[in-house]
Image: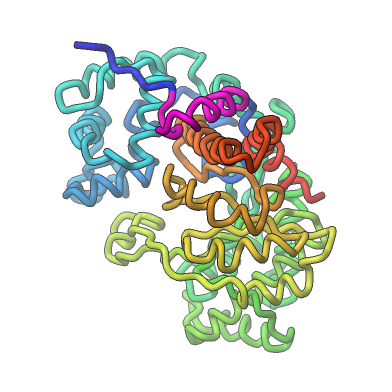
Amino acid sequence: MTAWTLHPDRALPADPVTRPIAREIYEAVRDLPIVSMHGHVDVAAFADDEPFPDPAQLLVVPDHYLTRMLVSQGAHLPELGVGPADAPGFESDPREIFRRFCAGWKHFRGTPTRYWMEHELVEIFGVTVRPSAETADQIYDQIAETLADPAFRPRALLDRFGIEIIGTTDPAWSTLEQHAQLAAELPGRVLPTFRPDPLLHPARATWQGDLERLATASGIATDTYAGYLAALRERRAAFVAAGGLATDHGHLSADTTPLPDAVASSLFEKALRGGSDGSGISTAEESAFSAHMLFQMAAMSVEDGLVMQFHPGVLRDHDPAVAAAFGPDKGYDIPVVTEFAHGLRPVLEAFGNSASFRMIAFTVDEDVYSRELAPLAGVYPALRLGAPWWFLDAPDAMRRFREAATETAGFSNMSGFVDDTRAFCSIPARHDLARRVDAGYLARLVAEHRLDLDEALDTAADLAYHLPKQAYAAR
C-alpha cells in the first residue's frame, strides 16, 4: 500500500496561472508564528502540562465539528464519549470511540474537518495510513505512543506548533490562579479572555447561582444593580491585571440598545425576585436587558481597554432535549439571520470613533458581510471585521469572505484569522488552511494586475500575523 501523504498544494488554486503565485505567497507565510487570540483550550492543559490522556480525548471528544457530523450519520453523542458518564450508552473506552471516528471517515469528505484532521494525523503524528475501520487500531496505537513522549505535552506543543500567543476563554468568576502561574512560567504566552455571557442573561437557569459566583470572586455583593455592575468592573480589572486583552460575547442578537439606568435596575431587581431562573421578567424584557448589558460591556471596554469580541447569531442548543441530557453547548448550535446595522448602531454612535475602544465583530450569516459588516468596518475606526468563524471557516467560505468584504473594508480593517477551537492539535491545521486560502485570493489579485507581488506578500504577512496582534492590542 502506498503511504498516505498530503499534496503540498492542497487548497491552493487549481488553475496554472495563479497556483505558482499562490505557492510563493504561501511559502512566505507558512512558518510565521501563530497568534491564537480567540480559542477555548482549557487553561488547565497548560498549567498542569500533563500528557494528553488518549487519542480519543485529544482528537475526537472535544471537537464538536467532528462529533456533529457523526451524529448526522446516526451516531449518538454518548457513543462518542460526549456527555455525562452516566448517560445511557456512554462509551468510556477511548479505543472504541476512536474506532467509530475512523469508521466514519468518508463522511468528512469535502469538509474543513477533513482538512484539519488530515493535517493533524499526517503532519503532527506521522500517520501513513488513511483512517478506516480496518486501520483504526493501528492509528490509535501510533498516536498513543507519540503522546507518551514529553515532547508532545501541551507546553512543548506551543513551541512545536509555533504558537506565540494563545488566548483561553474564562468565566467572569474565574480565580485566574492558573493564569497567574502561567504568567510567571510562560510570560505573555497564555492569556485569559473575559466571558461574562451567563451573567448577562437573567432567564438562564444558572443566572442566580452565577451571580453568587461573581459576588464571591469579586468580593462585592451582587444583590443590587449597582453592585452587579461594580462586581463586573472588578472582575474585568482582575483579567486586565492577569494579562487579558479581550472580552468575548456570544449573544443571539446583535442588539446593543441601552436602557435608562432606572429601567435596567428595575429589570435586574425583577429578575432577582423571580426565582432561580430569572423567570420574573418576560422574554422581551430579558432581551432588552441583555442588549443593555452589551452596551455596558462596550462602555467598560472604553474604560479598561479590553477588546470586545462579539459573535452573535447562533441559536444555541437547537435540540433542548439533547442539551438537557448531555450538557450545555451539546444540543446542536445553528446559525440564524443576524442584523448588525441597527443592532450595533448604539455602540458605534457612542464609541465607534473612540481611540479607547475596539470591537471585533464576527458572524455566521454570510449575507451581512458585504451589506452590513464590511461597510461598518470600512468607516468606524473602532470596529474590525472578524475572520470567517465557526460554520464559515471552510475553504470556499473563507474565499467568499475575502471576495465579499475586502473591496469595501480593505485588509487593514480585519482582525486576521482566529481558530475558535477546543481541539488543541487542530490549531496549526486551521491557521495553515487560512494562510493557503489567503494566498490563493492574493494570487488572483496579482494575476489580474490588481496588486504587485511585493504588496501581496506584505498583505499575506499582515493577515497571518501582524493584523491579529494589532487587532487585540487596543490598550
Apparent side of residue 357 relative to residue 259 in the rendered image (left or right): right
Figure quadrant of residue 109:
top left
Residue visible at 60% across and 64% down in the picture: 373
Query: What is the image's colouring?
Result: rainbow
Figure quadrant of residue 165:
top right
Residue 272, compared with residue 156, is above or below; it is: below
Residue 120, compared with residue 379, is above or below; it is: above
Residue 405 among magenta residues: no
x and y, in percent, of residue 372 in the image: 59, 68
Residue 139, compared with residue 290, is above or below; it is: above
Apparent side of residue 156 relative to residue 183 in the rendered image (left or right): left
Q: Nearest the camera: 451 or 142? A: 451
x and y, in percent, of residue 144 in the image: 34, 19
Q: Quadrant of the N terminus?
A: top left
Residue visible at 48% across and 18% down in the picture: 152
- State which region is magenta: 9-31
